[in-house]
Every structure is written in structure tokens, then in C-alpha cells.
Amino acid sequence: MNGFSSGTQSTVIVVFTVLVTLTLLMCVMAGPDRDDLTNFYTGYLSLTPLKNGLAIAGDYISAATVLSTTGIIALAGYDGYVLAVSTALSLVLLMFLLAEPLRNAGRFTMGDVLARNMPGRAVRIAACVVTLSATLPFLVVQLSGAGSLLTFILNIPHVAGARTTCIVIVGSLMIIYAAIGGMRGTALMQMIKIVLLLGTSVVVAALVLRRFDWSPGDVLRAAQHGSGAGPAFLRQGLQLGTSAVDRVDFVSLQITVVLGVACLPHITMRLYSARDVPAVRRSMSWAVGTVTTFCLLVIIMGTGAAALVGSRYITAADPHGRTSVLMLSQVLGGAPTSAGATILYSAVAGMVFITLLSSVAGMTLAAASSLAHDLFAHAVRRGEAEPRTEMTVAAWTSVAVGTVAIGLSTLVENWDVGVLTTLAVCIGASAVAPALTYSLFWRGFTRTGLLAALYGGAACALLLMVFSKAVSGTPSAVFPDADFHLFPMQSTGLVSIPFGYLAGWLGSRLDHRRRAADSREYRRLYEESEARLLAAAE
Amino acid sequence: MTYADDNRYPPSAPTGWPQPQTESHRLPPRRESYGRAPWPESYGHDAASYDSYGQAPWDEPYAYETHRHSADLTALRSAYRVLRRVSTLTALGSFVVYVVLSCWAPGLMGSKIAGELSLGMAVGVLQLVVTFAAVFWYGRSAQRSVDPLARAVRERAVATGRGAGVAR
């Protein structure tokens, strides 16, 4: 499909180089002072709500969102539309429910929120473990996707080592951004990314509509035709099937996305850097506005890809349709040798590249911060680490997390690991969401309950995922040839989310009964900190 | 919901905070206690010497100021709770209804309303468009119902001298 001249390829490479140079320069210039922790972790209390909101939106729209959502819309139509709605809604829920108390309760990481009235190292360790188990799969899936994506964009033939080289290059860049830039550097990068992403998407969506004389009906008609599914393209069921279990699976997946995506640690981490409550509210308004706009554009782009490229070509390039945006830009550009085609394709490729880089950098930073702040500074050193030491540790943990992620990604680069995205979102919804909601809103929540929610929810999601239909038993699974599936669904939310909440509740009940003095103490600490939680009064 | 039995605890500031020694307007008789702890000590410990009632602070009822403070806090808590519940349940509820209808009433959601545009698609896009209005509405109602109460709680917390810390 990628029948481009070498001129286009060299333009794309020039665009990539310019992007990398610019962002690297920016990271170095915006890097934090060497011994100010607040500066490293939150970095930019001075940023306006608009900029902060753009950074949140940038972190929120990962490469997986851009590429997979477009692909699912292009291939499954209606199911993809619902996914776009739920993606936008997740951030709305974060804003309505958690953003303001989170900002008041937290300092740098999720561990700070959870441990604020539950002293002890176990809480910190659990927070760190769950942060890692939610961010690492996401990281691995995007890095290993980077390999196949870059070989596709640059039209590198499938020789052994080409993908691995791409993964290592992207991974090394990501480590540099996270370790040098800190929150401030990555925030700037996210802002650039979101502006480029929105700009390019607007152009692509406008070109799609112009192709059909600005008539949505014509686009939809052509999409139904191009997808080969006919009217089914505009009905629920193409993605997961239409049997009763498949429909329950679909509902469960959407609810999991709504509850899980926005709770992921690399997104909540951005909230702690807002100056005050009105600022966090305005930041979130900007973020939600940006993300919603983008979701509307994704709907147009995905439908356009189905209409103009056709599902036959899309699935031939990638069974999940992750290259559909790129293929759409090729078709829209016109003749492969024209200047318009070159410019459009380079712009879209650049947008995908910067989205990929910034989202993996943001996730590495979140994982590394949790390791340095929760595990090292509070669990190992019991909160007595020197700020300077902690920052050095944070830089090195970025390197460590990045290296582990690169290693894992090269291991799985030939597998279809899209399921890891689902796993990360499921852990977000079934471990992080219960822990945060209980910890912020329930005064009877205790330490055992917290640990049970975090470990129980994560373990339940992980275990069910391993035995789900997404891992084995179907042609599109990770192991299509094996069949050890026991759980007949693609996502685990239906069981694991209630399990996480139940574990938290039962654990707390256990503490009320067995350790009444402790649980009264937790309640007292909660009530003491309530003025701070609700009103930011210290 | 009232927590009468929990009111026994004196209001103490966050622990582990180096003593900022903010002056309280209502404590002139106990000024001498300032000299007692020249080194930074945990706030929780020092809070006892601030207490206007003197000994056995853990069993004393709230002072008048504190009472007002807890009334403010209760008002703030319930204002937040109402706002949170209304907004979250509306957003989540409408989405759940939409997804369930998409799955189990495909005929209804698939009915064409204008050209190729089906009801389900229109509702989906409409939800995204309504999001802008919802966010605007949330911001405005939070500004009206929550922010004044939060400001009152904050000001009272500073006025009663229990922690001079401005929020970061």
C-alpha cells in the first residue's frame, strides 16, 4: 500500500528529525533545577490553566487512542463511535468526580494521595506496584507498536532487526525526555503534540468532508460500502459480535474505559501541578474540551478511512486497523508524487510520531516518579531522603523503567499485544479507581481495605485477562493457536471492577471488627484532613 | 449524617509540619506556652498547648469558633456531595442508557432520522457536543455552590490559627 517515492520518505525523515531536535532542545531548556523536588514533579505551578489543560489532554490522548480508535471506527463503525464517546466521557468523569479532591490531597504521585492518612510503607509499596502494573503494559504496547508503525511509515522492508532498531530508538528518546525534562519538559512536549495533533486532524477531517461535498450522509453511505459490512456498519456488534455474551462484553468494555482510562497514574499526576482548585477546574475544562473536539474529529477520520481506503486494504496492512490514519492521508493527498500528498503524509506521520514519543515519555515519567517517590523516598528511606538524592534516583529509575520497557517490547514485537491496552485500562478501573474513590470519599476506609482494593483489583484483572478470550481461543487473540480461555470476554471489567470495590469494602469491614482502634484512628485522620481535602485549607 | 461522637477530638493541624507559630487572636492568656517549644516539633503535639481550655484537650468539646468551623465544613461537604452526585450520575447514567440501548434495541438506535444518519449515531455525537455544555455548567455551579463555602472554611482555618499554610 505504501507506494511512495523516496522523496516522500526523505521528507518524512526530515520532519522526524526536526521534531526530535526541537523537543529535545525544549526538554533541556525546560529541565528542572537540580535540587527542587516540587519543580521536578509538578514543575510548572506557574503554568496557566490553558497550558495545563493542554498538557493533561496531551497525556490523555495516547498513541493507542489515536491509532486504535481510528482503526476500530474504520473497521467496526458504530462500536468505534461508542468507544470515542466513552473515551471523552472518562475525562469528564475525572473532572466531575475526582479532580478537585485529588488536587487537594495529592502532592506528587498517587502514593501521596493514598498514604496521606494511612501511614506505613505497605501503602506506598502497593501504590507503586499498581502504578507500575498499569503503566508498564501501556508502555510496552505503544513501544512495540512503534516498531511496526515506523517500519510502515518509513517503508522499511521487513528485515530482521528493523523493528527492533525502531523500538530501541524510540525507547532511548523516551528515556531522555523523561529523565532530563521531568514534568515540565514533558508538559511542554505534550502541549506541542496536542496542538500538532489537533491541527493535523482538523485538516484531515476537513479534507474527508470536502471529498464528499460536506455531506455527512454521503460519507456514511460510502463508509458502509467501503467497509463491506453494509448497514451493519452503523449498528453495534461488528467489533465483538452480536451474541448475548458479546453484547455484555461490549457494555463491560465501555464501562471499563469510562472508569479506567482517566484514573491511570500518568494522567492524575498532571492534576497535582495545578495551582488551586479553580485552576484545576479550568485546566480540566480545557482538557475536556480539547479531548472532546479530538474525539469528534476521530469519528470523521475513522469514517473517512472506511469510506476512502476500504476495510480490505486496512486489514491487509494491520488487522486492528492501526495504520488507517496514515493510509487515509495517502489517499487524501492525491497522486503519490504530488507535493500535496508529500506534505499531508509527512504531517500525519509527524503527528503520529510525536504522539507516540510524548505518550511513552509521559508514562515512563509516571512510573519512574512512583518508583523514586513512593518506593525509594518513602518506603526505603522512610521519607527522609534528600531532595537531591530523590531526583537523581528519579532520573535513574526513568532509565530503568525505559530499559525494561524496551526489553519487553522487543520480546513481544512479533505478537499482537493490543490486549495490553485493555489490561492497563482494566487495572485502572478495578484497582486505581476503587482505591481513589474510597480514599477520597469514605471516612471508614482503612489500610487493609486499601491494600485489598489495590492488590485484589489488580490481581483479579490480571488473572481474568490471562484466561480471557483476548489471550487465547480466538483467531484475533495473542495466542490464536492455543486455547486455555475460561473467561468468555475480551475485557475483565464486568467482574474485576465489582471485585475491586468489594475487596476494598470487605477489607475495611475486617479492620473495623478486628482492629477497631486502628480504624478509629484512620477515621480521625480522615476527618482532620477533610478541610484540606475539600477546601485546600491547611 | 452527623458525627457527634467524633467531635471529641480537638481540631489539630496536619502533623509533621514544622511549627509555623501562627498567632491566634483568641489565645492571649496562653502566650507563655510559646516559649516552651523552641525547636520545630510536630504540630499534633503542640496543638495541645494551644488549646484554650487547657488540660485534657482530647476530652474537651469544640470551642465556639471550631463549632462554626465544623458547620462550615459540613455545609461544604454536602454542597460538594450534591454537585458530585448530580454531575457524575447524570453523565454516567446517560452513557449507560445509551450503550445498553445500542446493544439491546438495535432497531430503535438504527432507525434513520435524516438520510443515512441513524438515531444511535446522532445520540453519540450529541453526547460529545453536550459535553461542552456540561463542563460549562459544572464550572458555573461549582463556582456558585462550592467556592464560597470553601473560601469560608479556608479563611476560618487561617483565622483560628490552626495552620498558617496556604495551599502550597
Image: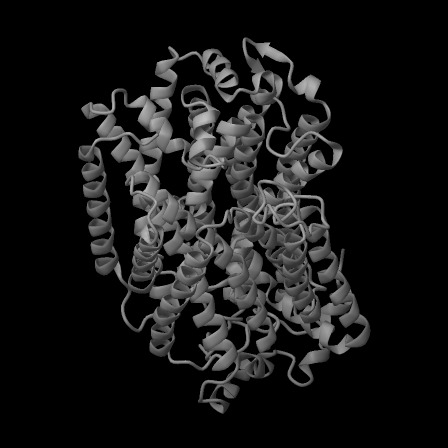
- Relative to A290, is A419 above or below? below
In terms of depth relative to the viewer, which is nearer, A225 or A518? A225
Q: Which of the two residues, B81 or B64, is positioned nearer the viewer here? A: B81
In this view of the protein, which residue sits in the foreground, A345 or A150? Answer: A150
Instruction: Please indicate, yes or no, whether residue B24 appears anywhere in the rendered image.
Output: yes
**Position of residue B50 in the picture relative to residue A318 (left or right):** right
Q: In the picture shown, does residue A356 fall above or below A320?
A: below
Which percent across, then down, holds residue A466?
A: 64, 55
Q: Quadrant of the C terminus of chain B?
A: bottom left
Q: Please give the count of numbered marks on the rendered protein.
A: 0
Left or right, residue A56 beside residue A193: right
Q: Is residue A345 left or right of residue A222?
A: left
Counting from the top left corner in percent of width and height, residue B57 is at 67, 80
Give the image location of residue A206, x and y in percent. 35, 21
Residue B117 versus residue A54 in the image, above or below: above
The image shows residue A511 at horizontal and vertical percentages of 76, 72
Kindly identify the residue that appears in the image at 31 percent across and 45 percent down: A354
Image quadrant for the N terminus of chain B?
Answer: bottom right
As drawn, is A430 to the left or to the right of A205?
A: right
Q: Which residue does the image show at 70% across and 66% down from the upper left?
A: A449
